[in-house]
Image: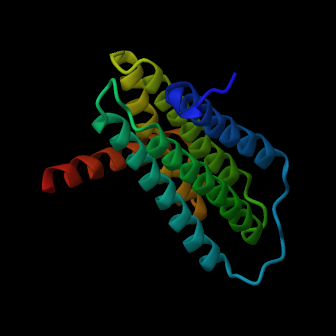
Amino acid sequence: DHRDLHSFPTRRSSDLLDGASQAVKTMVEDSSQAGCPQNSNMTVVQWQSQLAQNTDQVVAQSGKLVREVESAPPDNMDAALLCATARQLAMNTGQMLAAAHSTAGAMGGDDHLLATARSVADAVAKLLAAADDVQNSPHDQDKRRALHAAMKQIEDNRAALLAAARGYSTTKPDQELLLAAAKIGRASCRERV
């Protein structure tokens, strides 16, 4: 019995979105067991810059995925487009985690920086899972709210990660202050646009 795989796009794309989410979760688990490389031909400042660039790519790709989910007609989502964006987001997240390991190594082994990078990656995994949920239940507003909550978590954790990459050890009150500053910055940017 020959079946055309293109006749099952929703299930197949759902599997791919779920696969991207699982890949990011595996990266997070692997990163928690990997040590920090101590030798590198790049300086601490160069690694910090690379980590900032990779983190910005994760945030940008995450935003792209949310926009694609939100702009798609609920009963006709472009599965191929969503899957391509999810794959790119998973790859960007892996690059961010690798840069975080190298930055932490260049800084003498900063566990706080690595934990913060894993928080960003965990939020990406939640975003991918939420995108999969929205694709499977496009009319469910709770699933759409979960998608936006995961995006907000990525944006908020970005601020903490970039502070950690610059050597600022943040306590819980410091993190709350950074998150409040990020929220004000986002609101200000939205007002200007």
Residue 40 vertical placement versus 165 (above, below): below
The residue that appears at 55% across and 38% down in the rendered structure is: 123
x and y, in percent, of residue 30 in the image: 80, 45
The residue that appears at 47% across and 21% down in the rendered structure is: 136
The residue that appears at 44% across and 26% down in the rendered structure is: 135
Q: Quadrant of residue 121?
A: top right
Say which quadrant the C terminus sits in: bottom left
x and y, in percent, of residue 124 in the image: 55, 41
Residue 144 vertical placement versus 35 (above, below): above
x and y, in percent, of residue 178 in the image: 42, 48
Direction bottom: furthest residue: 41
Say which quadrant the N terminus sits in: top right
The residue that appears at 60% across and 48% down in the rendered structure is: 90
Direction front: furthest residue: 1
Q: Is residue 125 left or right of residue 114?
A: left
- Which of 87 and 110 lies nearest the eye of the viewer? 87
Q: Is residue 136 left or right of residue 102?
A: left
- Which of 53 and 71 lies nearest the eye of the viewer? 71
x and y, in percent, of residue 176 in the image: 44, 40
- Which of 124 and 78 lies nearest the eye of the viewer? 78
Direction left: furthest residue: 192
- Which of 182 and 129 lies nearest the eye of the viewer? 129
Total numbered badges shown on the rendered structure: 0
Q: Is residue 55 left or right of residue 183?
A: right
Q: How is the image coloured?
A: rainbow
